[in-house]
Image (spheres, rainbow, N blue to C red):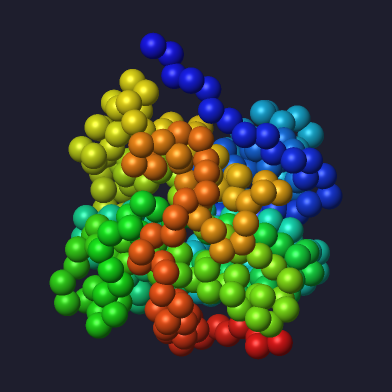
């Protein structure tokens, strides 16, 4: 039986400037393409310039006349994050949409970022934390909506507060969960602080459910030369329309969270099907691990210390 088409309507984004991390392939590329099709100017900050150029070509082919530009960004390097911030602040143009989508998942062996952090914690959370800090003046100028892409993995395991960098006993899946829990707490605290200090931005969360994205594919750069067995199963179920989403549907929760007038700050959006694995996007109950304001404040303080960036209090 053919899979039922799932989609959403994106409002006119003419005159809006959007930045999507991790947009060189997969969900991020799909998000950037849909934003460009709605009229937004789209910035693609990428680590691999060759893949970035291919992504730009893909967007322009799908959306003739698309306003899309390429920028350098390696979220695993705080210097690279700061450099992008410097470049965009020098341009001085407001940002209206920021989708923090990039991520790395379950390297088989512990790896570290340029700055010595466990790769998933450093890339998925700390890199984005620093990016938002560096871009805050532009986000405030654009009264931006910030959408941070977490994962259903944020609904299991915990933050390893005594060993955030997993130096004593590395577990790839638990470290991945930690990175997404920390990232989700950050996204919620960002909204609370914006309201408290009058920054004028809003922040919410999204997750893609489960789909055959590139996260679990062969990724030699993280020490995985072949796709995982889990991804093979995900691909098979997705192709048959069983429970799971597709790469096309997996982008919809973040697209909805970032653009829909109905999407609320401080909320989580994800697929509405069984187990929230696939289906149309909808508002979802916050995961238990994301409900503690105290833990959100704690990870915020630690993140400022580790990244050596800070947010204003006015």
In the rendered image, residue 292, in percent from the top left (x then y), is placed at: 41, 74
Q: Residue furthest top?
A: 1
Q: Which quarter of the figure is the C terminus placed in?
A: bottom right
Left or right of 62 on screen, residue 160: left
In-front residue for pair 75/188: 188
Q: Residue furthest right?
A: 15
In-front residue for pair 85/186: 186
* Residue 102 appears in the picture as rendered: no
In-front residue for pair 154/55: 154
**Height in image: 73 above or below 303?**
above
In the rendered image, residue 274, in percent from the top left (x then y), is placed at: 36, 36
Which residue is rendered at x = 59% and y = 75% of the image? 192
Which residue is rendered at x = 45% and y = 64% of the image? 184
In the rendered image, residue 240, in percent from the top left (x then y), is placed at: 33, 20
In the rendered image, residue 198, in percent from the top left (x then y), is placed at: 72, 78
Which residue is rendered at x = 20% and y = 38% of the image? 229
**Height in image: 1 above or below 132?**
above
Which residue is rendered at x = 78% and y = 64% of the image? 142
Q: How many marks?
A: 0
Left or right of 247 on screen, residue 222: left
* Residue 105 appears in the picture as rendered: yes
Q: Residue furthest left?
A: 169
Q: Which quarter of the figure is the N terminus placed in?
A: top left
Left or right of 84 on screen, residue 296: left
**Height in image: 164 above or below 259?**
below
Q: Residue furthest front?
A: 285
**Height in image: 106 above or below 116?**
above
């Amino acid at each position: 039986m053919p899979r039922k088409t799932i989609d959403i309507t994106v409002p006119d984004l003419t005159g809006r400037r959007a930045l999507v991390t991790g947009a060189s392939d997969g969900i991020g590329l799909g998000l950037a393409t849909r934003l460009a099709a709605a009229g937004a100017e789209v910035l693609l900050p990428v680590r691999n310039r060759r893949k970035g150029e291919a992504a730009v070509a893909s967007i322009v082919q799908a959306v003739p006349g698309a306003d899309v530009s390429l920028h350098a960004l390696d979220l695993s390097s705080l210097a690279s994050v700061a450099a992008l911030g410097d470049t965009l602040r020098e341009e001085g143009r407001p940002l209206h949409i920021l989708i923090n989508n990039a991520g790395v998942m379950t390297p088989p062996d512990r790896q570290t970022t340029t700055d010595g952090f466990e790769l998933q914690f450093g890339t998925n959370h700390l890199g984005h934390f620093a990016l938002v800090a560096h871009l805050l003046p532009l986000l405030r100028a654009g009264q931006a909506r910030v959408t941070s892409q977490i994962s259903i993995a944020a609904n299991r395991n915990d933050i390893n507060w005594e060993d955030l960098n997993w130096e004593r006993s590395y577990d790839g899946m638990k470290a991945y969960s930690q990175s997404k829990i920390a990232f989700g707490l950050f996204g919620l605290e960002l909204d609370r602080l914006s309201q408290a200090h009058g920054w004028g931005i809003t922040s919410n969360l999204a997750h893609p459910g489960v789909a055959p994205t590139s996260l679990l594919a062969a990724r030699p750069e993280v020490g995985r030369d072949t796709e995982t067995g889990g991804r093979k199963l995900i691909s098979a179920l997705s192709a048959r329309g069983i429970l799971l989403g597709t790469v096309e549907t997996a982008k919809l929760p973040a697209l909805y969270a970032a653009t829909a007038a109905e999407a609320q700050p401080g909320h989580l959006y994800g697929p509405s099907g069984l187990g929230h694995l696939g289906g149309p996007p909808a508002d979802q109950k916050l995961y238990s691990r994301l409900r503690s304001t105290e833990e959100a404040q704690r990870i915020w303080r630690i993140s400022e210390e580790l990244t050596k960036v800070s947010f204003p209090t006015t």
